[in-house]
Image (spheres, helix red, strand yellow):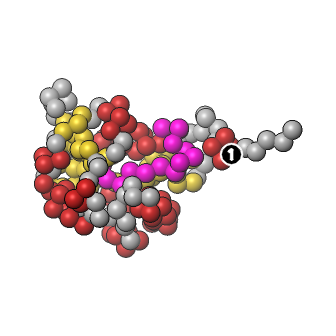
C-alpha cells in the first residue's frame, strides 16, 4: 500500500528552531512570507524596500538554515512597542516558532526599556498563552493612525488588541 506523506509529516518534531535578528540575505524570504500572508488577509503588505529600511527591527526563525517565521518590533512611542508582522510557514507552526519569535521581540522590548508591548491579532489564545491580555484597541491610537488608516478592513476590523505590561505584569 502506498501512502502519501504530506509536507507537515516530513517535519521532524525535534527540529530545532533558532530565532535571530534578520540579515540582508533574509529579505527575500521575509518578503515571500509577508506577501503570502498579505494575500490571505493576515498581514498588511510590505515592500522589499520597506523591509530593508526596517531590517534591524525584524527577527527570523529558521530550521536547518531555512527562514520559516518572521516578526518585527515596531516602536510606536517611547513607552509603547508593537509585535508586528508575525507569521510562520504553515508546515512549521507546530514547532513553536511563533512563540519563540514573540519571546525574542518581548525580550528586545524589555532590553530597550519599553514598559508596554501590544499586538492586534486574530490569534488571541496564542498571545494569551504568552502572557498577553485582551484590551481595547482605542488604547493604541498610535497604531490606528499609523497602520489602521491604510488597512482595507479599517471599518470592519476583526482583530483584537492584546497587551503585555513589562513593568507591572500583574497589572493589565
Q: Where is the C terminus found, in terms of image quarters?
A: top left
Find residue 128 and report its horizontal and vertical position in percent.
Answer: 31, 33
Left or right: where 32 falls relative to 51: right
- Look at the picture and state if 33 lies above or below 165: below
Instruction: Give the camera-side residue of 40 and 14.
Output: 40
- Look at the picture and state if 95 lies above or below 7: above
Residue lying at the far top in this picture: please name it: 170
How many numbered marks have been drawn onto this rendered protein structure?
Answer: 1
Say which quarter of the image contains residue 123. top left
Structural crowding at the residue carrying mark 1, measured as other residues with C-alpha within 10 Å and reported as few (<14), some (14–19) or many (≥20): few
Extent of the magenta region: 83-96
- The residue depicted at 52 percent of the width and 51 percent of the height is 89
Find residue 43 and report its horizontal and vertical position in percent.
Answer: 37, 58
Secondary structure of the residue carrying numbered label 1: loop
| Residue 111 shows in the view | no
- The residue depicted at 73 percent of the width and 44 percent of the height is 5
Instruction: Identify residue for label 1.
Output: 6
- The residue depicted at 61 percent of the width and 34 percent of the height is 14
Left or right: where 110 falls relative to 53: left
Say which quarter of the image contains residue 38. bottom left
Amino acid at each position: 500500500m502506498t501512502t502519501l506523506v504530506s509536507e507537515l509529516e516530513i517535519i521532524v518534531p525535534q527540529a530545532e528552531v533558532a530565532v535571530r535578528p534578520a540579515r540582508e540575505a533574509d529579505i527575500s524570504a521575509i518578503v515571500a512570507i509577508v506577501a503570502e500572508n498579505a494575500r490571505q488577509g493576515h498581514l498588511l503588505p510590505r515592500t522589499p524596500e520597506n523591509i530593508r529600511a526596517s531590517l534591524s527591527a525584524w527577527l527570523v526563525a529558521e530550521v536547518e538554515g531555512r527562514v520559516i517565521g518572521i516578526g518585527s518590533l515596531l516602536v510606536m512611542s517611547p513607552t509603547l512597542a508593537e509585535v508586528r508582522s508575525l507569521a510562520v510557514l504553515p508546515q512549521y507552526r507546530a514547532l513553536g516558532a511563533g512563540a519563540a519569535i514573540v519571546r525574542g521581540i518581548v525580550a528586545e522590548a524589555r532590553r530597550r526599556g519599553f514598559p508596554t508591548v501590544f499586538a492586534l491579532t486574530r490569534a488571541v489564545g496564542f498571545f494569551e498563552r504568552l502572557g498577553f491580555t485582551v484590551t481595547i484597541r482605542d488604547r493604541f491610537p498610535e497604531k490606528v493612525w499609523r497602520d489602521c488608516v491604510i488597512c482595507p478592513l479599517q471599518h470592519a476590523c476583526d482583530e483584537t488588541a492584546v497587551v503585555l505590561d513589562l513593568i507591572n505584569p500583574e497589572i493589565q
